[in-house]
Amino acid sequence: MAGGASNFINKEPEVVMGAMLRKSSALVKGKKTARVVTLAAAALAAALFFSATAIGSGTVSKITSSYSWAVTISPDGKHIGYTDDFPWPGQKYSKDLTDGAETVWEGLPSFSHDGRYVAFVADDMGMSRVYREDTLDGTRVLVSSSSAGEPANYHADEPFASWDGRYVAFSSRADNLVAGDTNGRMDVFLKDMLTGALTRLSTDSNGAQGTGGSYNYWDGATTPRISPDNRYVVFTASFTNLVPGDNNGAVDVFLKDTVTGTTVRVSAGASGIEANSSSWDPEISADGHYVAFVSGASNLVPGDVGYYDVFVKDVTTGAIALVSTDASGNQMGYSYSSSLSSDGRHVAFSCPDGICFKNLQTGALETYADNSAGCAWWGCWGPGGWAPAMSADGKRIAFVGSDYNVPYEESQPVFLATTSLCVENSKPELVVTRGAVYWASYQGFADRDLSVDFTITNNGGEPAFSPQVVGSVSTNGVTLNTALPYKTGAIYAGGSADLTLVYEVQMGIASFRTTTYATALDSCGNSHSYPGPFTG
């Protein structure tokens, strides 16, 4: 049978993709050779599942029907996590914004950049533990354990996954995770998921553990956030010994340099003056240069009349700005829940008008809210919107809003706003390069299944989300045997994705022409089309 197969394979059909002809090479002993085929074109067209039209700048769409209190978003803006708290204790979900697929999690998910890795809290016989799951293969690994793998002897909470998923930060009162943990307080830890090493971060610059201060919920250190370059971690702490001269008796925001071990207090004025009230809810830019946080202090900048305000601190220069102001520079009133873009140029936060989005370079301000929420019989909550979570590029903001036109259990859904940075027709530059054509196996040859490999490369700066082959039309009776749609996953700038399509080619077919169509979305959910010619 081997001889018969080889005789036929030496007469493989010629495959024409568009107008380009590539001849096959022989298959020797079941191994594929470097046979090349190119695609003439890829058509990119799709719509976001939650909207009848592509999202443009400044739109708001309801994307869940839930009673939520919290929401998270992946840095690439393609996955959200949210709570559905009615009836209590409710459930936690993640949703893929490209296809609407939902996944149930034990705890509110924290995502790596592309959503591949998810960190969350799960119950283990009455003990809250932090885990990280690889969504590609379902592998789940315990995070809240010592470097030797010993599980924490107390609850762990507030997981935050790093950009690449390698690290997970969390808080815990456990005293068996690192040597010398005797403070009996909440500490912030960082787990290296590659090596298993665990480090306590809520220490001073010399490594001494945090002591002093006790502030109800903030009894120690909480709410860690990792910079996308993995070097810096910001957190909130009530400890009084992490930096010299901490005498304000309040909760402060600190930054830890994981390379040098240096600890810096962020929640201070430009001159170094201590905040006269507590600060919390830190967010950090990609390079650790900027930190956003919320504070009740009135002495961090001149003229602060004393609300809960959002500030952004330049950690390098010490400069600090109150950013929760209107277009005229006036304080808005109570503002909270900050979210900072990775370049540190834009901040989103809850403000009296709903969700505010500010350009820190120009001062331009945009406001988003659920303006169609309706009102309960006792009145309106206002435009609505709190707990914003912004994508790293500042193009998408997920937030919790209110909708009284639906049953109570659906009255606090999650909304998604697109900002002015979300430019329509920001076209991903996808290029399809040639791959191999081969009989994948003797059975493939016997079934007349011809395999064709392709590589789709993104040569531009705009990521392509949910690229997938949705159709392939061929001449001479050749049909596609690969189930469609064929999904490849997101392709970021400079990245690529490989795929293989299988065509049924009947005996005697010497050549055929085919045009293959794909779909993809840009970072704003807009669709694009690159139709190629089809010659029958």
Image: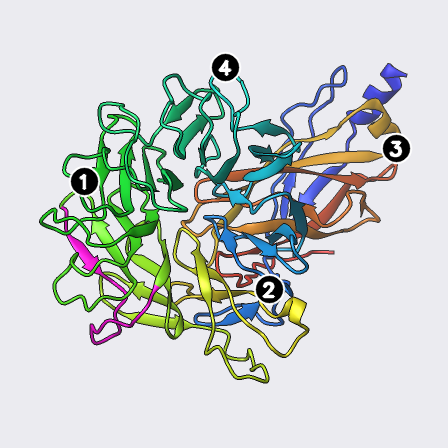
- Say the numbered circle drawn on residue 148: 4
Q: What residue is pinned by disc 1?
A: 246
Camera-side residue of 502 and 374: 374
The label shown at residue 447 is 3
Q: Quadrant of residue 529?
A: bottom right
- In the image, residue 458 sits, relative to residue 387, either above or below, namely above
What distance separates the C-alpha of mark 1 from that of mark 2? 44 Å
Residue 334: say if magenta: yes
Mark 1, secondary structure of its residue: loop
Residue segment shown in magenta: 318-335
Q: Earlier in the sequence, mark 3 or mark 4?
A: 4
Q: Quadrant of residue 125?
A: top right
Identity of the residue furthest to the left in this view: 271
Residue beneath disc 2: 63
Tell me which label, 2 or 3, sits earlier in the chain: 2
The amino acid beneath tag 2 is Ile
